[in-house]
Amino acid sequence: MEIKRVKLVYFSPTGTTRKILESLTKGIGIEEVGHIDLTLPEGAQPNVPPFSDELVIIGAPVYGGRLPVTAINRFKQLKASNTLAIPIVVYGNREYEDALLELKNLAIDLGFIPVAAGAFIGEHSFATKDIPIANGRPDSLDVQKAMDFGTKIKDKIAALQSPGAPMNLEIPGRFPYEGGARAMVVSPVTKEDICILCGMCASVCPTSAVSVDGNVATRVEHCIRCCACIKNCPTGARVMEDGMWLKIANWLNQNCATRKEPQLFGVEV
């Protein structure tokens, strides 16, 4: 089979998932690439026609070993008909646990046929300069591995006789799924003395939890702690101060410092 078009579908609040998907696409080497960005609220109701003969790469971050509920709900709007797909998850150097299996199964439910899959590492949402957790990842080595993975996927698909051929793609994980993001009704806070009210925090929030109108207000119950507002604030005014949140971040810093490498499925590595 020949790959004629590639569509990237992703939920990527801090950009790490998008970076991996784009790198993988470079390895596939197809010029016709489309993006369906489901990260921000305005992308939550995309008018996306059913997928058919393109290759779709679906990506999401891992929160507590599972897919973010917000991402799941937005992915559920998609429909496919025997469309080849590559599920990709990106996690913060702890564990991806059941997330990749969950994404694979979700893709199947939507009408996709997963042909390969991967779990890559990205800078943890809770990471800061003072509390590093896989800071700077995906780095150049991760990008190269994603590109190499894309090349192998292209070769695998080229050898297929039809998209309906059995794949038997085995993904580690448990069902029923376990884990998930901790139930914490907390959010980043704003240091008003250095906030310039630029509105960046509101513009990058995937759930519209942040608003700026003379001051920065956060609807805590809507915050998914993706930390896009912290990582994109130009003055460093958005910070995490909650004691439990900081305790988790420090635990991750101390216990998840050893570099992990991407895990790839469906191709020979």
Image (cartoon, rainbow, N blue to C red):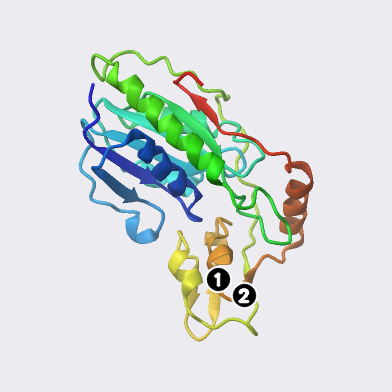
Which amino acid, mark 1?
Cys
Q: In what quadrant of the picture does the N terminus appear?
A: top left
Image location of residue 33, percent across then percent down = 27, 44
Residue under pointer 2? 237
Residue at the image point whose x is 72% and y is 63% from the top: 242
Left or right: 187 in relation to 148 = right
Q: Which residue is mark 1?
A: 233
The vertical placement of 224 against 120, above or below, is below
Q: Is residue 207 above or below residue 94?
A: below
Horizontally, is 219 left or right of 162 in the view? right
Residue 139 percent across, percent down from the top left: 56, 46
- Quarter of the rendering containing residue 76: top left
Question: Which x, y percent locates residue 223?
Answer: 55, 60
| Camera sees residue 35 | yes
What kind of residue is marked 2?
Ala
Q: Residues within 10 Å of mark 2 (few under 14, many from 20)?
A: many
x 34%, y 13%: residue: 166
Q: Is residue 208 above or below residue 117?
A: below
The residue nearer to you, when weighing 174 against 263, is 263
Q: Are marks 1 and 2 in contact (CB under 8 Å)?
A: yes
Above or below, 136 against 164 in this view is: below
- Work out whether residue 23 or residue 208 is closer to the camera in this orientation and state it: 23
Mark on residue 30? none
- Crowding at mark 1 (Cα within 10 Å: few <14, some 14-19, many 20+): some
Instruction: Write the residue at 54% across / 78% down.
Output: 216
Q: Position of residue 98 (x, y in %)?
A: 56, 31
Q: In this rendering, does residue 138 appear at all?
A: no
